[in-house]
């Protein structure tokens, strides 16, 4: 029956209720299969089926009503004890439930119940009621049902394909034969529509709850599948858990109308059901296939926009076909080469930014469609771009573009600012290094010329303002070249401010056209000719594709795959708004005891507030003497301080979440890296229960991913090298979290080759990161810190995992933004350990207030080892540096005013107040003018504008009780600045402190 004749409001209520009924029935059926004698479960299943029958009958939905009525009959027989619960009957009722869901979905989307053939299911139910249900009888009607389902081409019809198809594959496999299996070539859905559509949510927060649960399910699926991979025999409990997770996600996605996710999880669930029954064996190929499906599920979930309740769909048809093929044939080997293509076909089509592992379709993809393509492609191998490296490269370039714009603006006002000129030189040098390691050799060469211009101008006596017009034109050309190159990278999108660039550069942008013309000559001219068909992927911007053309040109080699690039071209406009990484969860789970305590504290706060009101009234009316009221006011203030401390402590505990939420992604990551690199790697995680502030946990994921990738790719040797060095063939990576005073530390350690400080210095000099003089002045610890320099990489070859010299500097920047620090330890031949030290919270810290040059500064108390006063006569000179012997330890001394480029007064005093700070295991004495007091301060960021100045030694600011602004010092940066004093390098932008 059509819904055109029904009240829309009544129909809307029916859709909600019907889906709720079906979601109640399915999990209870699975539980009933485990406990067949549980009458309570039978009643819980019977009632919603009875309600569904009644509601559909009232609305005149005859097909739904007929099938629900028959399912109710068999459930009633089970309740009466006339029939026993068996696996065949459970499959029959589940297939009826799936068919009911399909009809409800069809009714909701198209207005009719659809062409779902319910006759075979009803016939089997009637046979079961007569006691004539058999395996043969169950197999015969299925082909009719499949012809109905497969005749529906659009992906949405596959959303709730009836599960009774499950019993057909054995016959299908026999009929198909080996020749048919080798001819299996899944194709993307030609009718796929990438237009975002609205999801059906019930009540406020429903979509947020769905996303949070979906992310948990994805984590659990990864965990279960990895555990199953380590148990070759197949663990029944793990298989059942995995099945339930797919089943729950299928149900949840069906409720909100997420068609692609529902279709994909249904096929995965159907395949797992075969594994549960022992019809398909658990194997490595099966685990790989399911993990690829989980990756695609994660990409689908990331496409949901909670603000608009809409989703940007991905074409999952290829993966659905692969899963269905394995379910039918029971042979994973037949689709082993198609698994990466299935995932990429969906993720590359609507949005390249969503790719979790592979940056673009690989040469292997061509093997399944065009046998001749791999040979041609192997002759000219194209470098692969890792999505994470691409994202880090884009982030670095955006930061440098913004820095250039700010520098030009400041130099227009005053061209004599040497610090700004030096910063501009370093910025262009970073761009040169970063583009070079991404393989953009022409851009690197052009950036090198720009670096030379700046260097020549800053080392001469000429007025730098004369160079500004030339440099702005050079920057405009360079920016256009880089923007064009980024457009060809998979998943790379420049942010709006970076793409626009400096206003002054706009009139000169036209000059970039002749510069970009020569780009195709060295690389791209001979390459695109063999495969012109896939070019629509970048058809909107043919010119920008020139600089790095050697990279994308080889990848679309298989001409037979024109469907995928065509889909990609159709979806290109949506790339700009697609998120590059999963959205952070907006909810947090809290123990109700913490909320109870919070409520009690709020109660005390209200009592104290009323006490203040009473004291004010007593003063107004003169009921009490002033000194009595003053004493009571003091007592009340102390009580208020205690309550506010308690309130702050409770709120901080509420915000704490275990780091396990971040660590849970790494077993899968290490497993994939191990397979890709060919190394045996074991990940050992410790301290997963350690709690962080939620805002910290959300930000440390990406830096940790990069550190773990480097540990596996660079740190660990291959098996032959390890055996030759007397080590075990299997390498180990440790991921630890633990409390360290008032901070939290995370360690990433490996037992690999370690880092040689001398080799690092040689590589840095050879690649222009530092000069030979700077290298000679470095100690081993500073040499190890070179790995965080922009563009630095000690990798002997670039892999698709890491090694391009882009990322570690961004890791350090991200950790610094979290008010944390990174410490590197390494021993050649033994391994390396990187320790991230992070604050428990980003909001409030204890700090020691000091005064320098008339200004007040805050030093985080975590970094303060002690405070003392020393006599000037006890100071001595060690290597041209001041030092003092403090309790048997030689301690380096530096005046804080000197580091901050402020007036110094050490020589004018006899006794010096000193703060001893500790940076990991290093200590330094800072001489200040006055030691003030300890205070709790609220951390405020410096803001985007001030961050562009690269103000070393400062991590943020705070507002005092009188409204004044106090800058917060970064102890790690302060220590680094002290080691550079002898090298006469600019430490901070001159005048930044006094101009605050």
Image: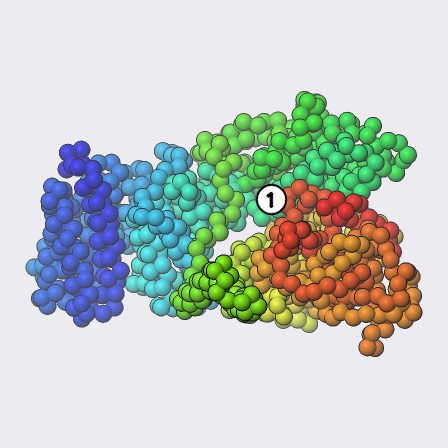
Name the quadrant containing residue 469. top right
Along the line of sight, the residue nearer the viewer: 571 or 18? 18
Provide residue 992's location: percent of width, then percent of height: 75, 46
Q: Estimate how packed mark 1 is, as few (under 14), some (14 to 19) or many (20 or more) residues with alpha carbons within 10 Å.
A: many
Residue at the spot 10% in from the left edge and 62% down from the top edge: 77
Can residue 47 be seen here? The reply is yes
Q: Is residue 548 above or below residue 859?
A: above
Rendered location of residue 814, percent (x, y): 63, 52
> In the depicted view, which residue is nearer to us: 142 or 184?
142
Secondary structure category for the residue under label 1: helix
| Residue 99 appearing in the image | no
- Seen from the viewer's position, the closer of residues 109 and 468 is 468
Task: Please name the residue shown 50% across and 45% down the image.
Answer: 355
| Residue at the limit of the structure toward the front, as seen here | 622
Q: How is the image coloured?
A: rainbow
Residue 241 place in picture, x, y as percent: 36, 64
Q: Which residue is mark 1?
A: 390
In the picture shown, does residue 372 fall above or below 507? below
Q: Residue at x 77, y 47 (%)?
A: 994
In the image shown, does 144 or 753 lie closer to the viewer? Answer: 753
Which residue is drawn at the image coordinates 41% and 45% (left, top)?
Answer: 306
């Amino acid at each position: 029956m059509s819904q055109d004749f029904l009240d829309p409001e009544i129909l809307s209520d029916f859709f909600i209720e019907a889906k709720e009924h079906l979601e109640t029935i399915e999990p209870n059926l699975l539980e009933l299969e485990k406990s067949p004698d549980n009458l309570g479960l039978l009643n819980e299943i019977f009632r919603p089926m009875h309600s569904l029958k009644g509601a559909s009958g009232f609305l005149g939905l005859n097909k739904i009503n007929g099938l629900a009525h028959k399912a109710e009959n068999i459930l009633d027989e089970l309740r009466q004890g006339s029939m026993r619960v068996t696996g065949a009957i459970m499959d029959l009722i589940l297939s009826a439930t799936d068919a009911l869901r399909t009809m409800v979905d069809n009714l909701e989307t198209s207005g009719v119940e659809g062409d779902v053939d319910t006759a075979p299911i009803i016939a089997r139910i009637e046979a079961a009621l007569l006691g004539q249900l058999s395996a043969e009888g169950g197999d015969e009607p299925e082909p009719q049902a499949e012809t109905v389902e497969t005749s529906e081409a659009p992906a949405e019809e596959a959303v709730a394909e009836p599960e009774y198809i499950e019993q057909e594959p054995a016959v299908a496999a026999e009929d198909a034969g080996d020749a048919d299996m080798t001819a299996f070539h899944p194709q993307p859905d030609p009718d796929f529509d990438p237009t975002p559509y609205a999801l059906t949510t019930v009540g406020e927060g429903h979509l947020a709850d769905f996303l949070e649960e979906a992310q948990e399910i994805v984590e659990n699926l990864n965990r279960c599948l990895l555990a199953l991979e380590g148990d070759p025999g197949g663990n029944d409990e793990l298989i059942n858990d995995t099945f339930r997770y797919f089943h729950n996600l299928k149900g949840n996605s069906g409720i909100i109308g997420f068609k692609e996710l529902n279709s994909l999880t249904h096929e995965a669930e159907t395949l797992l059901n075969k594994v549960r029954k022992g019809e398909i064996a658990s194997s490595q190929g099966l685990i790989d296939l399911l993990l690829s499906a989980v990756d695609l599920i994660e990409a689908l979930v990331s496409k949901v926009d909670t603000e608009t309740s809409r989703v940007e769909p991905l074409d999952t048809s290829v993966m659905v076909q692969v899963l269905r093929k394995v379910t039918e044939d029971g042979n994973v080997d037949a689709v082993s080469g198609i698994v990466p293509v299935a995932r990429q076909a969906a993720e590359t089509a609507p949005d390249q930014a969503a790719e979790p592992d592979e940056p673009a379709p690989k040469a292997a993809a061509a093997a399944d469609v065009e046998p001749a393509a791999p040979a041609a492609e192997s002759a000219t191998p194209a470098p692969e771009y890792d999505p994470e490296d691409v994202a880090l490269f884009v982030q670095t370039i955006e930061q440098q573009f913004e820095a250039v714009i700010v520098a030009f603006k400041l130099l227009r006002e005053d061209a004599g600012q040497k610090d700004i000129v030096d910063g501009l030189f370093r910025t262009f040098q970073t761009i040169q290094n970063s583009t070079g390691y991404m393989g953009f050799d022409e851009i690197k060469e052009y950036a090198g010329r720009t670096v030379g211009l700046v260097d020549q101008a800053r080392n001469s006596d000429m007025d730098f303002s004369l160079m500004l017009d030339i440099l702005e034109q050079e920057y405009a050309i360079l920016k256009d070249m880089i923007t064009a190159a980024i457009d060809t990278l998979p998943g790379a999108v420049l942010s709006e401010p970076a793409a626009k660039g400096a206003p002054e550069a706009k009139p000169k942008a036209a000059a970039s056209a002749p510069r970009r013309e020569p780009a195709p000559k060295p690389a791209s001219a001979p390459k695109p000719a063999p495969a012109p068909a896939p070019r629509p992927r970048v058809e909107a911007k043919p010119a920008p594709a020139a600089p790095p053309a050697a990279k994308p040109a080889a990848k679309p080699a298989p001409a037979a795959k024109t469907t995928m690039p065509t889909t990609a071209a159709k979806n290109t406009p949506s790339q700009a708004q697609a998120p590059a990484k999963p959205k952070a969860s907006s909810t947090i789970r809290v123990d109700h005891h913490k909320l109870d305590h919070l409520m009690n504290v709020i109660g005390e706060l209200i009592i104290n507030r009323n006490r203040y009101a009473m004291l004010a009234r007593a003063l107004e009316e003169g009921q009490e003497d002033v000194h009595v009221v003053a004493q009571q006011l003091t007592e009340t203030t102390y009580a208020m301080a205690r309550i506010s401390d308690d309130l702050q402590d409770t709120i901080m505990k509420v915000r704490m979440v275990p780091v396990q939420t971040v660590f849970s992604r790494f077993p899968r990551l290490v497993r994939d890296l191990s397979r890709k690199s060919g190394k045996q790697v074991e990940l050992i995680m410790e301290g997963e229960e350690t709690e962080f502030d939620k805002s910290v946990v959300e930000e440390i994921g990406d830096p940790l991913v990069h550190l773990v990738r480097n540990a596996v790719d660079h740190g660990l040797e291959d098996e032959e090298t390890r055996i030759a060095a007397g080590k075990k063939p299997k390498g180990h990576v440790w991921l630890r979290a633990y409390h360290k005073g008032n901070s939290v530390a995370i360690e990433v350690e490996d037992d690999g080759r370690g880092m040689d400080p001398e080799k690092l210095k040689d590589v840095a000099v050879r690649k222009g990161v530092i000069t030979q003089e700077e290298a000679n002045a470095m100690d081993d610890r500073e040499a190890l810190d070179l790995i965080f320099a922009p563009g630095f990489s000690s990798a002997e070859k670039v892999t698709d995992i890491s090694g391009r010299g882009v990322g570690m500097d961004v890791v350090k920047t991200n950790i610094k933004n979290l008010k944390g620090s990174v410490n590197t330890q390494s021993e050649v031949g033994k391994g390396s350990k990187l320790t991230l030290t992070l604050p428990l919270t980003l909001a409030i810290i204890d700090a020691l207030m000091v005064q320098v040059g008339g200004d007040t500064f805050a030093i985080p108390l975590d970094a303060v080892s002690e405070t003392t006063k020393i006599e000037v006569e006890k100071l001595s000179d060690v290597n041209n540096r001041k030092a003092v012997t403090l309790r048997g330890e030689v301690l380096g001394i530096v005046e804080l005013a000197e580091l901050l480029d402020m007036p110094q007064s050490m020589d004018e005093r006899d006794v010096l107040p000193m703060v001893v700070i500790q940076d990991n295991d290093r200590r330094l004495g800072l001489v200040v003018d006055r030691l003030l007091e300890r205070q709790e301060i609220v951390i405020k960021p410096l803001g985007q504008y001030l961050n562009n100045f690269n103000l070393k030694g400062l991590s943020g600011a705070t507002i005092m009780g009188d409204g004044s602004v106090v800058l917060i010092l970064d102890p790690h940066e302060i220590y680094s600045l002290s080691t550079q004093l002898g090298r006469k390098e600019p430490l901070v932008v001159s005048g930044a402190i006094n101009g605050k």
